[in-house]
Image (spheres, rainbow, N blue to C red):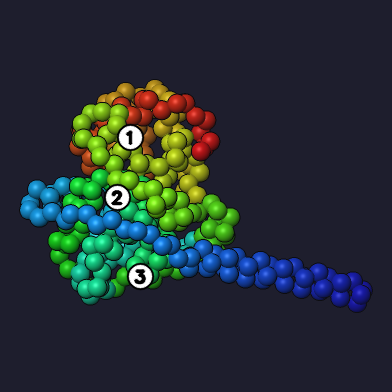
Amino acid sequence: MKKALKLVGYVIATVVALVALALVSVYLLSNQKLNKSYQVSVQPVVIPTGSEALGRGQHIAATRGCADCHGADLAGATIIDNPAMGRLSGPNLTRGRGGLPASFTDLDLVRSIRHGVAPDGRGLFLMPSSDFSEFTDQDMGDLIAYINALAPVDRASVPLTIGPVARGLLVAGKIKLSAELIDHAGVRPATVQPGVTVAYGHYLAAGCTGCHGPNLSGGKIDIGPPDWPPAQNLTPAGDLAKWSEADFIMSLRKRTRPDGSPLNEVMPAAFGLMNDTELKAIWAYLRTLPPAPTGKR
């Protein structure tokens, strides 16, 4: 009996040691990814002035989901807060206490938005710069002009606390930093004329790829908690094949599918703030996608 108990004790101790070793390995390997330095050549953009530029910048911030991570006033917000994923918060983008320091320049904003890289060279965790890397210089300049004009809000930015599941997904390559995905040397800002065109829709739909995948076929959203539902397949192989342009616009504006069921809360409401030209352009682009099985990214 004593030998059996001793054997069980050895087995338990071994299992505990292996688990501890695995956790330490995940922590160290994830830190390597988080602390990796990216050397990028950041091209400056012209920052415009005037009410028209600020209005365009405000529209871009509203429709590209900046408030989802940085809060309605862009002074910071917590996106995820649970033991598995950690506490993930968007920082305060205003110049109030706890916000962007006085040393943070327009070029730093371009580096962060277009490249997903902090001034010290580290990749920004969960910053979806791969969605923004092809922003036209005008859109980038308008957005930065708006950020610079934000009313200062005194609110401390919440430090990131990355949980074990998020670290494991990072090590497994399921969560990738945008800085890792972007071809920084090959970034060429798009030049596209707004209009109800496939080209403009393609440009705008870059903001959909973070959840729906590079080919917009949907499936599991790796960057979110395990309980997040899969993203919709936006190709003609998905449910949108049965929708009309009016159905598409209505679903984003009213957050209700044509059958009356609500869109899941994970789907950002920001896209519903796009104007008719933008939504019709995205719809035109989605209609040109090749059919792809759901989740086959």
Q: Is residue 215 visible?
A: yes
Residue 181 in the image: above or below residue 239: below
**What amino acid is at disc 1?**
His
Q: Position of residue 155 (x, y in %)?
A: 25, 71
SS class of the residue under badge 1?
Answer: helix
Occupied quadrant, residue 284: top left
Q: Is residue 224 visible?
A: no
**What amino acid is at disc 2?**
Gly
Residue 275 in the image: above or below residue 160: above
**What amino acid is at disc 3?**
Val
Q: Nearer the viewer, residue 267 or 56?
A: 56
Residue 66 in the image: above or below residue 207: below
| Pointer 2 with pointer 3, Cβ within 8 A | no
- Residue beneath label 1, please? 202
Occupied quadrant, residue 119: bottom left
Q: Position of residue 156 (x, y in %)?
A: 29, 73
| Pointer 3 with pointer 1, Cβ within 8 A | no
Q: Identify the disc placed on residue 158.
A: 3
- Residue beneath label 2, please? 65
Q: Residue at x 51, y 38 (%)?
A: 297
As measured in the structure, the alpha-carbon distance from the residue carrying label 2 to the one carrying label 1 is 17 Å
Residue 260 lies left or right of residue 138; in this view the side is: right
Q: Identify the disc placed on residue 18.
A: none
Q: Residue at x 35, y 70 (%)?
A: 158
For marks 2 and 3, the one nearer the N-term is: 2
Residue 110 lies left or right of residue 1; in this view the side is: left
